[in-house]
């Protein structure tokens, strides 16, 4: 009798197991997840050198924070793959930008001094984050950050030559010394006493792992190699870079020091829960 009961239960167990296995769809792709992509850090560029008018210096400081939502899934080799999230919340941007440039000289009774000073906040579309992509070697992510600030400020130029003094309020005074991906655009105000001048330009930061020298590597003007990526698709990723470059100017009359601090996280989650 006991043997019959055991046999009945065993038969039912095998039947339920077989049905459960048939109900599962083999090889069904995992449902893409949402993830929040956040970057923050600072970029500083300092120049010291000379021009035909005198000693030159400039300092650009950018403090940035930006976030956007992505879709995260698996590619054909099992690595995390990112794409735009449909109906994602509006990207978040904050930060600030300032620039100070100056050219100055004095000899005998003659002197020359030109300056430019601009500052402003980062907001809205001033910072654009690319979708992270794996490098060809699969050892980390490539990330592009585009920063396009809109600034307000003032400019001046005072030159004393043989007892005569000349002045200029316009901003076309040769005091811009930084590596822009799109050149400085100045909108001189006709009434500088009431409204500041406006300025805009573009900075491109291409973050990537150490990939060697060359057009696609760390020798590129906008490339920053050496970023370290840690984490996983399930727990999220962290990308960090802290690097300084020192470069001669194109005319070899000065040197530029460029420093980038970059921190990024990609954390799985849901926009509704933020």
Image (cartoon, rainbow, N blue to C red):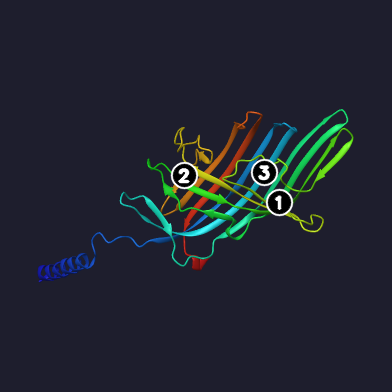
**In the displayed image of the protein, which residue is found farthest to the right?**
163
Local crowd size for mark 2, using a 10 Å CA cut-off: few (<14), some (14–19), many (≥20): some
- The image quadrant of residue 191 is bottom right
> How many labels were placed on the picture?
3
- The image quadrant of residue 92 is bottom right
Label whose residue precedes the other's in the sequence (1 or 3) = 3
The x, y position of residue 213, in whole percent, is 46, 32
The x, y position of residue 91, in whole percent, is 54, 61
Local crowd size for mark 1, using a 10 Å CA cut-off: few (<14), some (14–19), many (≥20): many
Q: Does 63 sit above or below residue 249?
A: below
Label whose residue precedes the other's in the sequence (3 or 2) = 3
Quadrant (top left/top right/bottom left/bottom right) for the N terminus: bottom left
Q: Does 144 sit above or below residue 259?
A: below
Q: Is residue 150 left or right of residue 154?
A: left
Residue occupying image coordinates x 23% and y 61%: 26
Q: Secondary structure at mark 2?
A: strand
Q: Is residue 33 left or right of residue 100?
A: left
Q: Is residue 96 left or right of residue 231?
A: right
Local crowd size for mark 3, using a 10 Å CA cut-off: few (<14), some (14–19), many (≥20): many
- In this view, the residue in front, 31 or 71, is 71
| Residue that carries the numbered disc 3 in the rendered image | 60
- In this view, the residue in front, 194 or 164, is 164
Gap in angstroms between the C-alphas marked 3 and 2: 28 Å
Q: Is residue 207 left or right of residue 26?
A: right
| Residue that carries the numbered disc 1 in the rendered image | 119
| Residue that carries the numbered disc 2 in the rendered image | 229
Label whose residue precedes the other's in the sequence (2 or 1) = 1
What is the number of the mark on residue 88? Answer: none
Tag 2 and tag 1, C-beta contact below 8 Å: no
Residue occupying image coordinates x 64% and y 42%: 44
- The image quadrant of residue 34 is bottom left
């Amino acid at each position: 009798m006991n043997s019959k009961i055991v046999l009945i239960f065993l038969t039912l167990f095998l039947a339920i197991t077989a049905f459960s296995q048939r109900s599962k769809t083999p090889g069904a792709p995992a449902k893409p997840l949402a993830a929040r992509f956040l970057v923050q850090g600072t970029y500083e560029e300092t120049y010291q050198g000379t021009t035909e008018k005198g000693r030159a210096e400039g300092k650009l400081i950018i403090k940035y924070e930006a976030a956007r939502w992505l879709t995260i899934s698996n590619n054909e080799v099992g690595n995390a793959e990112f794409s735009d999230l449909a109906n994602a919340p509006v990207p978040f941007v904050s930060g600030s930008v300032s620039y100070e440039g100056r050219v100055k000289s004095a000899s005998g009774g003659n002197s020359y001094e030109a300056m430019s000073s601009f500052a402003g906040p980062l907001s809205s579309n001033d910072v654009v984050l690319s979708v992270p992509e794996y490098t060809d070697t699969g050892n980390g992510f490539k990330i592009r950050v585009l920063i396009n600030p809109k600034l307000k400020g003032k400019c001046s130029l005072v030159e004393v030559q043989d007892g005569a003094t000349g002045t200029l309020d316009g901003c076309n005074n040769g005091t811009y010394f930084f590596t822009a991906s799109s050149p400085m655009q100045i909108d001189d105000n006709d009434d500088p006493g009431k409204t500041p001048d406006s300025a805009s330009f573009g900075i491109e930061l291409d973050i990537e792992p150490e990939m060697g020298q060359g057009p696609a590597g760390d020798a590129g003007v906008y490339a920053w190699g050496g970023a370290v990526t840690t984490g996983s698709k399930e727990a999220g990723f962290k990308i960090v870079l802290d690097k300084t470059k020192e470069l001669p100017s194109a005319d070899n009359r000065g040197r530029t020091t460029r420093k980038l601090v970059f921190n990024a996280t990609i954390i799985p989650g849901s926009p509704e829960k933020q």
